[in-house]
Amino acid sequence: MGREKSRRLSGCRDFRQRLVLATLTSTPITIKDIRAGEGGLRPHEMSLLRLLDKVSDQHVIDVNDTGTKVGYRPGVVVGGKGLEHDCGVHRGIGYFIEPLLVLGLFARSPLSIRLKGITNDTKDPSVDAFRMVTLHMLKHFGVPLDGLELKIESRGSPPRGGGEVLLRVPNINNTLKAVNWIDEGMVKRIRGVAFSTNVSPQIVSRIFYAARGLFNKFIPDVHIFTDHRAGGLSAGYGVSVVAETTTGCLISADATVSYPNVDEMSEESEKPELMSPEDLGEQVASMLLEEVAQGGVVDSIHQGLLFMLCALCPPDVSKVRVGQLTPRAIESLRNIKEFLDVKFIIKPDPNSNTVTLKCVGAGVKNLARKIS
Amino acid sequence: WKKSLLARTLARRSASLMQLVYGQASAELDNDSGEEDSSDEEIFVPKGQKKQVKNELPSFDDIDAEDYSKFLKVELRDWSNEDLIKSIRDRFVTGDWSKASVRGR
């Protein structure tokens, strides 16, 4: 890689996405001014860099003393079996799965990694959402389904975590497949998982009844599985719900109630009042209905990932429909343009209040894969 | 004439959406190569656009924004309200199928 190709970025926003895009395009990056005066990189970002270090080879990661500057020269993503990573208790496991999924697809050998930490929290998509929605989303892009798996072995809520999941990601042969995915269909059923750790198992059914009360106004086919774990280091409960449409689109929402995580704990020493299971059930149902009302083939959580996958496709036209663009999705579009030079054509659809996006993929190939 | 009007409005709206997403991206690119300050680019935003930006992007120019993929809506509407229920009734298989197929077009 020539020196002139390297990118200089500033600030820690979209840290994950920038690292992923840099890796896939083999572009060296330097990120400076990361939280200048506020201690630079946070523990979860350091943990992400260590994770990146684990799954790749021939790369250089360089962090300065104060943690305000990161230099990264990507190598090859090797993947591999039997890996293990402690995600810490600052962010949920969801924070780490998202970049891993994309990197895993472009790795040399199938990735199988055990992630430990917080499985469900308020900031990151829950592991249930990944299992029920994100993995199925990859299917549309021609990713083989066998070997794509997320097994939840134990759960952990903030602040102390203690959850464990096993993520397996297969490699793609050469490139992804371009999609034409604009038919959102109609919602035919609602599924979900309600979980609790270290609290009374009754709470789970209280969540379920509250959520179903709201859903049953629309559709009778509602089923929420319950998952109660007696163990776990911290008390917490939560629910993830998914609406399946007639065209196979999955729209999800999730929420968790627990004590705040370590970062926020120091600010207020008092333990705050927690939301009741009934309120939580209703809240999550409203969130899902809100997502359905927005329209689009994916929910707002997955917009960024969807655009990224579209942009990585071979040079064919991909067309997708989403609801209102989230700030993060807009950031993703900008990052994609910067790294992959793929510009989407964005058209609002006044008929349904959705947005259609079209792009010609950059044709990123899996060059790491062994040819055997 | 109504059709042409609609088409024109549509064209304008899509242009503004593209601008919203990519307009400032070019400013960012300049910023990466040189040392110029991006803050003066942020000041001069077309009037209508600025309002939209404010509504949708609370942490727009924060380079240290936290990396969340979950997008939390500030307020949730009360979905037991009959009018709201009616507004998305046709997004479910229990609703009107012909209306839903119109929407897909």
Image (cartoon, coloured by chain):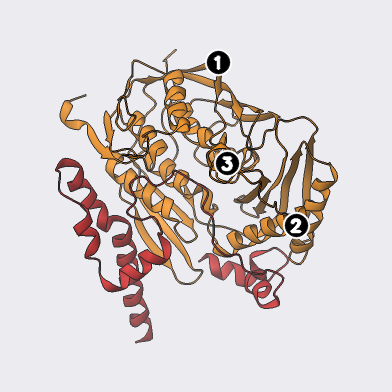
Chain colours: A orange, B red
Disc 2: CA contacts within 10 A as few (<14), some (14-19) or many (>=20): many
* Amino acid tagged 1: Lys
Chain ID of residue with mark 1: A
Q: Which residue is mark 2?
A: A211
Dot in front, 1 or 2 = 2
Q: Quadrant of the N terminus of chain A?
A: top left
- SS of the residue at dot 1? strand
The vertical placement of A57 against B21, above or below, is above
Most foreground residue, A308 or B36: B36
Pointer 1 with pointer 3, Cβ within 8 A: no
Most foreground residue, A202 or A179: A202
* Amino acid tagged 2: Ala
Pointer 2 with pointer 3, Cβ within 8 A: no
The vertical placement of B42 against A175, above or below, is below
Dot in front, 1 or 3 = 3
- First-in-chain label (2 vs 3): 2
Residue that appears at 37% across and 33% down: A19
Outermost bottom residue: B1
**Which mark is drawn over residue A81?**
1
Q: Quadrant of the C terminus of chain A?
A: top left
**Which mark is drawn over residue A265?**
3
* Amino acid tagged 3: Met
Q: Position of residue A165 (x, y in %)?
A: 64, 28
